Image (cartoon, rainbow, N blue to C red):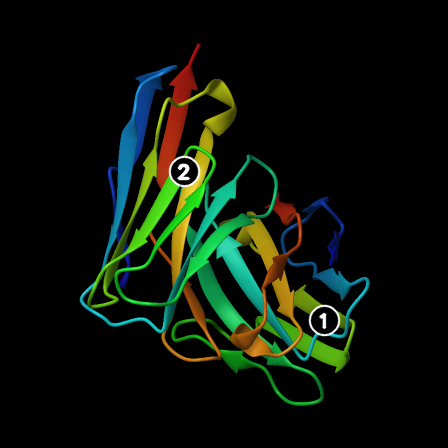
Amino acid sequence: TQLLEQSPQFLSIQEGENLTVYCNSSSVFSSLQWYRQEPGEGPVLLVTVVTGGEVKKLKRLTFQFGDARKDSSLHITAAQPGDTGLYLCAGARSTDKLIFGTGTRLQVFP
Amino acid sequence: GAVVSQHPSWVICKSGTSVKIECRSLDFQATTMFWYRQFPKQSLMLMATSNEGSKATYEQGVEKDKFLINHASLTLSTLTVTSAHPEDSSFYICSASLTGLSSPLHFGNGTRLTVT
């Protein structure tokens, strides 16, 4: 059973478009992280959100943690081909385990 | 910054043989290491949590006798896939942290295992 469902699964857009990826769960998480993974490599941490309602910005990327700490979103403004990759959310319910979401594969065409 | 090194990056083995994958933290001491498995175009599935000096904690459905994990030092954890079969072919990724999840998690670059 996947605790963290991401949507959409796949996203194919043109350069310059905006997009939002959602990460939803029925469970409460103490913190939530977003990663991006390139083919054949390990995930790279983008951000960690801890407080319900928290919003963090990383250049063109905006991350939000839901008020109830059960969901999160990632919004990318003016997507670029370099944003292409697999985006993964990951939730921690305690200090000893990180559970990954189902993943969103983004393709940005020039 | 902190670096986690995985070796080998890819390996091809024959069915029935065993393969060992190493995960090293290069510039910090990792009390906890995690092993994940990733099928093509899918997310990471946690296999087990490895704590230095103690037995690994396996996730439900992961055979501990097939996927042997050893975390003998604070900088090295190994995953041995015993009696490998084609269905074990996958991308295996380790991650390490200084103190469980209360400190940042660093990922290795993964090992692509192909069993023929």
Q: Secondary structure at mark 2?
A: strand
Task: Report which residue position mark 1 lands on.
Answer: B77
Q: Give the residue displayed 71% in from the left and 89% down from the top.
A: B53
Q: Quadrant of the N terminus of chain B?
A: bottom right
Res B79 seen here: yes
**In this orientation, which residue lies closer to the viewer: B77 or A38?**
A38
Count neighbours of disc 1 (C-alpha within 10 A) and say few if under 14, some if 14 to 19, many if 20 or more.
many
- Image point 60% across, 38% down: which residue? A40
Q: Height in image: A99 above or below A14?
A: below
Judging depth in this view, the residue of A107 and A63 nearest the camera is A63
**Tag on residue A61?**
2
Which residue occupies 40% across, 20% down? Answer: A108
At which x and y percent is residue B29? Answer: 76, 74
- The kind of residue on which mark 2 rests is Leu
Residue A27 position, x and y percent, is: 23, 71
Q: Chain of mark 1?
A: B
